[in-house]
Image (spheres, grey):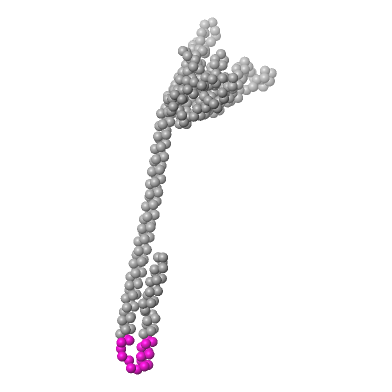
Amino acid sequence: MTNNTWKYSLDNIDNEKGFTQWVRLLKSIKSTNLHALILEYDQVEKKREQNEKYSYIEELPFNLQFEEKQIVNYEDNQVKTILDIHVSPLKRKLAYTFVNRLLIGFELLGGQIYTGHEGDYYTELRLPYVSWKVTLLETKVRGDTVGAMQPVYRKKYSGTLQLELFNLENKKKLIYTDKLESLLNQLELIFLDLRKEYLPIRDKKREERRKSEAEQELIRVRHATEKLAEEQEKLKAQIDKNRNILKEEIFDHIEYLEKIKKVERYLHTLQSIPCDDEESKKILQDYVEKVQSLYNLNKFTNIIELWNSKFD
C-alpha cells in the first residue's frame, strides 16, 4: 500500500467514524523509510555526538585547533533547523518510529510541517485555521551523584517519552507520555484530540470569515448606493438646469409668437386701408411683404421644428 492510498481529505474530517478508521491505518506506516526531517535530525545529532568526543579541541590555543580538527576529521556543527526532539540515544529509534507516523500521517491529512528558523528549533504542524508546536522529549530525573564528581542538581534521562502539542490558537497544551502505554499505541487518541481542537476553531474562523465577507459586501453595496445617489443628484441637477433652459426658450417662443401676431394684425389693418393711388398701393404692398419676411408664421414654424429636433 502506498502513501497516496492513505491520504484523507480534510473536507471529510467531520466524519468521526471515517476519520477514526483512517487513523488506524497509520500503524501500517513502516520506519524503513523515515521522513526527510527525521533523517536530517539524525544526521545532525550523530555529528554532534561525534564532535563531543573532541570537545577538548575548543580548549586548545586557536592556532592548534585547525591542525587538531584535520587530524581527527572534525567538522563544525552546521546551524540547521531540525525537529524539536530531545531524547537519549537509547530512545532514539523508538522516537523516530513514533514521530515518523505522526509526521507522515499529518501530511496525509493535508497538513504541512515547519521547523523554525536558523537556530530556533521548533516543529510546527499546520492545518488551515490552526497550528500546533510539537515537542518530543525524554523526561529527566535527579541523578545519583554518590561517589562521582558531579553537581547535586545533575539530571539524567528517565526513559519516559513525553509528547507536547501546543495549540497556537487557543494556547492550550496537550501532553502524552508512555508511562502506561506507548506513544505508538496512543497515535489514534492523539489524532482524535487534534480533530477535536481543529473543528471548533475551523468553524469559528469560517464564521468570522463569512461575517467579514458579509460586512465587506455591505460596505461595497453602500458605496455603490452612495455613488448611485450622487449620480442621481447630478442627473437631477442637470435635468433641472435643462428644464429651466427649456422654460426660457418656451417663453421666448411665446413672446416671439405674440410679436408675430401683433405684426400680422398691424399688417392686416394696413391692407384694409383703401388706396386708389397705384403707386401708393404698390409702396404699401412692398412694405407689407418686407415686414412679413421678417415676422411671419412660416419662419416661426421653422424655429419650432429646429427646436424640436434637439429632442429627437
The residue shown at (43%, 31%) is: 202
The residue shown at (54%, 15%) is: 91
Quadrant housing the C terminus: bottom left
Q: Quadrant of residue 208?
A: top left
In the image, 234 versus 270, the foreground residue is 270
Give x and y (percent) for residue 44: 59, 22
Quadrant housing the N terminus: top right
Q: Quadrant of residue 31?
A: top right
Q: Quadrant of residue 2?
A: top right
The furthest residue to the bottom: 277
Q: Main secondary structure of the magenta part?
A: helix
Give x and y (percent) for residue 222: 38, 46
Asked whether residue 277 is drawn in magenta, I would say: yes
Query: With respect to residue 128, does 228 lie above or below?
Result: below
Q: Is residue 64 visible?
A: no
The total of numbered circles placed on residues is: 0
In the image, 130 versus 73, the foreground residue is 130
The residue shown at (55%, 9%) is: 149
In the image, 72 versus 284, the foreground residue is 284
Instruction: Give the magenta range.
Output: 270-287
Asked whether residue 281 is drawn in magenta, I would say: yes
Give x and y (percent) for residue 138: 51, 16
Give x and y (percent) for residue 159: 51, 12
The furthest residue to the top: 147
Q: Is residue 78 visible?
A: yes
The residue shown at (38%, 71%) is: 304
